[in-house]
Image (tube, helix red, strand yellow):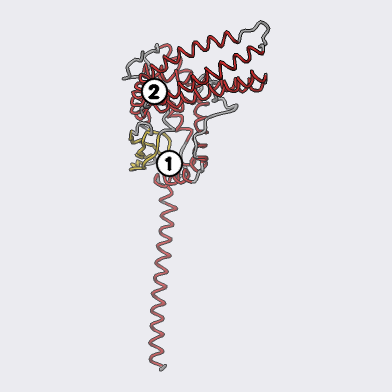
């Protein structure tokens, strides 16, 4: 290679090296600018907080979720809206009764909102709605309230997020449109979620501005379907109630004793009644109910009736084993199922009563 060619190649390599250096420098500058934008601007926006909230849900991380949703304030504000709505359309209440109930719900607010926060966190962590159980104070009616029914009326478990829409920011506050759908009636609704910026420049959801409007939109639609379902099933319920009453009367006669102990003949007669008549009647009753079309808004009530029947049958099955084998543990298990069944039946009665007195719903005979 002659000297001229060598110099030409050297200059070419230097130009290429200079271009490569320039490109690398531009990449570094752009990367630094992006990092600066991300860490000093984007991380301090409502959009970033919403993105992190979604990721927390997808990654089953309730602690991360709680960093971007102020669950204490959200549940507190939602609780006030929900409990106001509970009595708003109940025409059967006097002013004194309504005031008394409102005071009661104010008294138990810390327990119910705290329990709801736990339920939400469990849902994010496990992907399932887990009701309070065991020694939890919200289990059963320990607080004088059916928390399961309360949770259902909040629409929390049957509301699905569809899309996060536009964000309107004003200083340290912002309003975000979140499109949701109510699963039973497939009713779309846009929730207006309020966010606030804390002293660390982190944005959090603090309350749902139109939550009560959502309840007022969805509840009448559900109540209408529930009323229709109750009317459609009433002939079946009335007919079987007569059969159950007759069987209950026979059961009471068979279980009468002078000394508190059953004879062998009594044990067999009681077991035969339950096995051959009571349980088959319960099964036939549920089968007839299942043949009746359930309107979309009445799905919860239909499931409660199914659970009531299933739980009652389980209770009688354990009672049968207990009376035939004289095993106290079986009687205890039967009593546990009977307690659960009574709670479900009270819930069903409450749904029917509430539907009858709710706004825009005709009274049910």
Rendered location of residue 365, percent (x, y): 36, 13
Depth order, front residue of 201/214: 214
Q: Which mark is residue 85?
A: 2
Q: Is residue 247 left or right of residue 36?
A: right
Up the image or down, 289 lies above or below 54; here it is above
Depth order, front residue of 11/282: 282
Q: Is residue 318 left or right of residue 357?
A: right
Badge 1 marks a residue whose secondary structure is strand
Depth order, front residue of 363/259: 259
Task: Check disc 2: other Cα within 10 Å, few if <14, some if 14-19, many if 20+.
Answer: some
Q: Which residue is mark 1?
A: 197
Identify the residue shown where x is 41% and y is 89%: 6
Q: Quadrant of the N terminus?
A: bottom left
Q: Which mark is residue 37?
A: none
Q: Dots 1 and 2: beta carbons under 8 Å?
A: no
**Of all residues shown, which one is farthest toward the bottom?**
2
Identify the residue shown where x is 53% and y is 24%: 311
Identify the residue shown where x is 46% and y is 45%: 58
Give the quadrant of residue 263.
top right
Q: Is residue 213 left or right of residue 144?
A: left
Up the image or down, 41 lies above or below 94; here it is below
Instruction: Tally the marks.
Output: 2
Rendered location of residue 363, percent (x, y): 34, 15
Badge 2 marks a residue whose secondary structure is helix
Task: Check disc 1: other Cα within 10 Å, few if <14, some if 14-19, many if 20+.
Answer: some
Which of the two discs, 1 and 2, sits closer to the camera?
2
Identify the residue shown where x is 44% and y is 24%: 287
Q: Alpha-carbon distance for marks 1 and 2?
A: 30 Å
Rendered location of residue 156, percent (x, y): 43, 32
């Amino acid at each position: 290679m002659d000297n001229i060619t060598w110099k030409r190649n050297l200059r070419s390599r230097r130009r290429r090296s200079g271009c490569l250096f320039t490109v690398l420098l531009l990449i570094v500058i752009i990367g630094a600018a992006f990092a600066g934008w991300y860490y000093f601007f984007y991380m301090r926006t409502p959009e970033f907080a919403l993105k992190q909230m979604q990721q927390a849900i997808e990654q089953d991380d309730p602690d991360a979720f709680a960093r971007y949703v102020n669950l204490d304030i959200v549940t507190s504000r939602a609780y006030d809206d929900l409990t106001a709505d509970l009595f708003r359309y109940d025409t059967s209440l006097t002013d004194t009764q309504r005031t008394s109930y409102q005071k009661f719900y104010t008294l138990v607010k810390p327990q119910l909102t705290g329990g709801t926060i736990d339920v939400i966190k469990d849902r994010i962590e496990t992907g399932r709605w887990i009701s309070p159980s065991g020694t939890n104070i919200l289990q059963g009616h320990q607080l004088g309230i059916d928390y399961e029914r309360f949770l259902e009326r909040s629409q929390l478990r049957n509301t699905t997020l569809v899309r996060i829409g536009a964000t309107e920011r004003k200083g340290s506050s912002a309003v975000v449109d979140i499109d949701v759908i109510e699963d039973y009636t497939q009713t779309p609704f846009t929730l207006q979620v309020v966010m606030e910026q804390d002293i660390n420049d982190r944005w959090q959801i603090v309350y749902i501005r139109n939550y009560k409007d959502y309840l007022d939109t969805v509840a009448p639609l559900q109540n209408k379907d529930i009323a229709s379902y109750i009317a459609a099933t009433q002939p079946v319920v009335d007919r079987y109630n007569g059969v159950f009453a007759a069987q209950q009367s026979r059961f009471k006669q068979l279980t009468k004793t002078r000394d508190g102990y059953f004879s062998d003949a009594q044990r067999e007669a009681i077991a035969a009644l339950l096995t051959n008549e009571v349980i088959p009647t319960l099964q036939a009753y549920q089968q007839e109910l299942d043949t009746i079309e359930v309107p979309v808004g009445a799905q919860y009530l239909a499931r409660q009736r199914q659970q009531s029947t299933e739980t009652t049958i389980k209770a009688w099955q354990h009672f049968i084993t207990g009376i035939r084998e004289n095993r106290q543990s079986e009687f205890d298990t039967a009593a546990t199922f009977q307690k659960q069944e009574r709670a479900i039946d009270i819930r069903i009665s409450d749904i029917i009563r509430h539907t009858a007195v709710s706004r825009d719903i005709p009274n049910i005979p």
